[in-house]
Amino acid sequence: MTAQTADPRGAIIIGASSGIGAALARELAADGYEIGLAARRTDRLKDLGASLPTKAYVATMDVTETDTARDRFRSLADAMNSVDLVVISAGVGDANYDLDWETERRTIDVNVRGFTALATAAMDHFERRSPAPGDPDGHLVGISSVAAHFGTGGTQAYNASKAYVSRYLEGLRSRQTGADTNVTITTIEPGFVDTELSYGSFWQSSPETAASQIADAIRDEREHAYVTRRWRLVAWVLQVLPGSVLRRLFA
């Protein structure tokens, strides 16, 4: 008899066309994952997919169109041999000191509504899987931010939306307690990363460095990770400082 070859591991990255998402696609492909790439900019996804050493799948997706995005997520998952990991990296964070409603609404639509639509679609996919006995059902990773720990004038919607991401993932982990399924859920909170969303250069890392540390957290099945790791100290300081001091720091 000929031994059957197990399906390769597969990862879907939502928000893969640039920044952390694109760098993580390269990192995970180097680890042997087949990669599902999802974002609005199809040409970038195709170029990225062609450069990967493993098989790549492309899905054009605008997460603000939540019903369509969920349908395309399911179609992408069905097209792949296996989906063991889903990373939600899509996000926006425009500065908005004038409180322009369209800017605030887009931040909420992408970072809250879009995130939740795809997180629930990923959990539904994992909970419907039938892996071999003893194997995990899947791994969901959400890219939040150290900004989730404080509010800043101008980026108030972004910071609040990332607080939502962190707390939502925490809630999903709590939901796993006593559940029949075994889904690992990881919250990633980056500091400044050299991407289109970066608002500073203090302790700024490259997308490649960030992706390497995120991949480490995935391999270790960690519940939470700061990227880079030194941002753990910043998050701790932000949590203990009085609000009046924080407002002066970020005025």
Image (cartoon, rainbow, N blue to C red):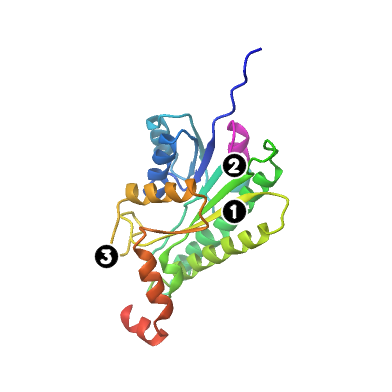
Residue 208's spot in the image, x, y percent? 33, 47
Q: Position of residue 31 (x, y in %)?
A: 44, 36
Residue located beneath label 1 in the image? 119
Compared across the picture, whether 85 is left or right of 245 comes to right
In the displayed structure image, the side of residue 119 where residue 237 appears, left or right: left
Give the total number of marks visible in the rendering.
Answer: 3
Quadrant position of residue 151: bottom left
**Marked residue nearer the N-terminal end (1 or 2):** 2
**Amino acid carrying mark 2 in the image:** Arg
The x and y percentages for residue 241 are 39, 82
Residue at the spot of label 2: 72
Would you call the spot at circle 2 few (<14 residues within 10 Å), some (14-19), or many (20 or more)? some
| Mark 1 or 2, closer to the camera | 1
Q: Is residue 218 left or right of residue 203?
A: right
Disc assigned to residue 136? none
Q: Residue at x 43, y 46 (%)?
A: 215
**Residue placed under numbered mark 3 in the picture:** 202
Q: Amino acid at mark 3?
A: Phe
Please tell me whether mark 1 sits on a helix, a strand or a loop. Answer: helix
Residue furthest out toward the left:
201
Quarter the C terminus occupies: bottom left
Which amino acid is tagged 1? Ala
Highlighted range, magenta: 73-84
Q: Is residue 75 magenta?
A: yes
Using the numbered discs, state the Cα–Cα distance from disc 3 to disc 2 in whole angstroms: 38 Å
